[in-house]
Image: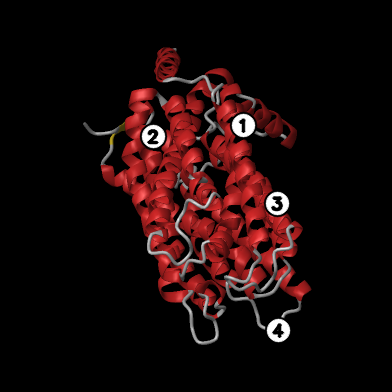
Amino acid sequence: MQPTRVGGPITYATKLFYGFGSIAYGVKDQGFSYLLLIYYNQVLGLPVQWVGFALLMALVLDAVLDPIVGNWSDRLHSRFGRRHPFMYAAAVPVALSYMLLWDPPAGLSQGALFAYLVVVAIIVRIFITFYEIPSSALAPELTENYDQRTSFLAYRYFFGWAGGLTMATLAFSFFLVPDETHPTGTLNPIGYAHYGFAAGGLMLVAILISAAGTHRHIPDLKAPPPKRLVSLRQIAAEMLSTLSHRSFLMVLIAGVFSSMALGLTTSLTYYFTTYFWELTSKQLTVINLGYFISAVVAVPLSGILSRLLGKKRAAITVWILSTVIYPLPFLLRLAGLFPENGSPLLLPALFCLGTIAVGFFIAAAILVASMIADVVEDSQLTTGRRSEGLFFAANSFIQKCVSGVGTFLSSLLLGLIAFPSNAKPGEVPGAVLEHLVLVYIVAIVVLYICAMLVLSTYRISRDSHEANLKRLAAATEEIAAE
């Protein structure tokens, strides 16, 4: 059976083109979340608190732009529709600025390097927002079907993860590799500029292919509201009215907790792999290949669970499983029950548990995004406005702000436990590493439990969504009859 949208049947190529563009966001997210802190701190020598604060500044300033871009794309009148002008305009600036981020001028003082990081990081985040928010908002327009929305967003999350993992694999296989001067690949400064050039090129290609591939659907997408003169105060009031939707607020608050936990995790991951597990670049490549399996499995898993349990129950179920499995290697190591560093059993054990935990996490993220898509019609019945861009932008705003807080907290945590700069694997005191692991595990488990409790109050189900579609269709028929 072909998936459907308002304008009629579409092919699976539409899902592929829609999802493909998220490679750009996945590449950016992987670089910012995993590599940027260790690069500017351990490789370039910028104090860890400075790097954390720089990334927090860039992220918060970018996040403020999210609702503006979302609302703007909901209202835009152009012959290329509401979303595509933003997508096309973002492609080249995103690629160029991302390349520059990984190749700062030589000889900069610490103050100048800090300023460079702030400015370029802001530019990257601004232009990726101009692509990601309008592109994400296409999903509720391309299909109204409860399960097909999960499928569309599954493709998006798959390609987002695939993009980030592809660049991570290339980084540890070809760019961030050991040499005579740098025995640890992640501490080799030469490879980062090459990584940035390759990553920027991939982002450019992904955005242009996605925008061009979905371009033919522009005539069938939702039309913007009629042009009217409104004050900034009226726009702000309408935005506030839209975003006060109860079920959306529950998703938003759950996102506050989960994004903070994710910020902690992503910022500290390579500290753990480099100093706690002491993995080589080749071993990190193997771990990342496991995450490809996670993403592949999460696509059908999210759809199956959505049909069997409904989106809310399915999301909470896989979230619980991920939260239980992810900390197991750390806890078992501290209890003396996990393979020691250098053991031939270490990599297979980390590979299996990590692949399973991340697969459940991706499935949860897909389902939560699909829950946001279903808010669109529920809100439309109350406000009379379709606000796809605004809803996805507000969710992105919260995730960015709070994830930035998580990143900043990770930098503070590293400072508080006196984690050494320019550290070498095997030379960090065991007590420092154990303290870091214990505080980290307690923090993420508490944060994820809070997120799941809040998400449990979300109200939109399959039945209520289908009832909303019928009510909107009836209202449309009444207007047409008049």
Q: Nearer the viewer, residue 475 or 52?
A: 52
Image quadrant containing the N terminus: top left
Sequence-wise, the earlier of marks 2 and 1 is: 2
Left or right: 24 as drawn, with respect to 147: right
Q: Amino acid at mark 2?
A: Thr
Q: Residues within 10 Å of mark 4 (few under 14, many from 20)?
A: few
Sequence-earlier tag: 2 or 3: 2
- Percent position (x, y) of residue 469? 41, 19
Residue at image coords 51%, 35%: 388
Q: Which residue is mark 2?
A: 150
Please tell me which of labels 2 and 4 falls first in the chain.
4
Q: Amino acid at mark 3?
A: Leu
- Could you tell me how far apart the alpha carbons at marks 1 and 4 are, in whole angstroms? 46 Å
Q: Secondary structure at mark 1?
A: helix
- Location of residue 345 by image quarter: bottom left
**Marks 3/1: CA–CA distance:** 18 Å
According to the picture, the residue beneath numbered tag 1 turns out to be 450
Instruction: Give the CA distance from mark 2 to mark 3.
Output: 33 Å
Q: Residue at x 49, y 72 (%)?
A: 195
- The image shows residue 272, relative to residue 463, as above or below, that is below
Q: Mark 3 and 4 residues: CB-CB less than 8 Å, in contact?
A: no
Q: Name the residue carrying label 3.
A: 409
Which residue does the numbered mark 4 point to in the structure image?
107
Few, some or many residues within 10 Å of mark 3 (<14, 14–19, 20+): many
Mark 2 surroundings: few (<14), some (14-19) or many (≥20) residues within 10 A: many
Q: Secondary structure at mark 3?
A: helix
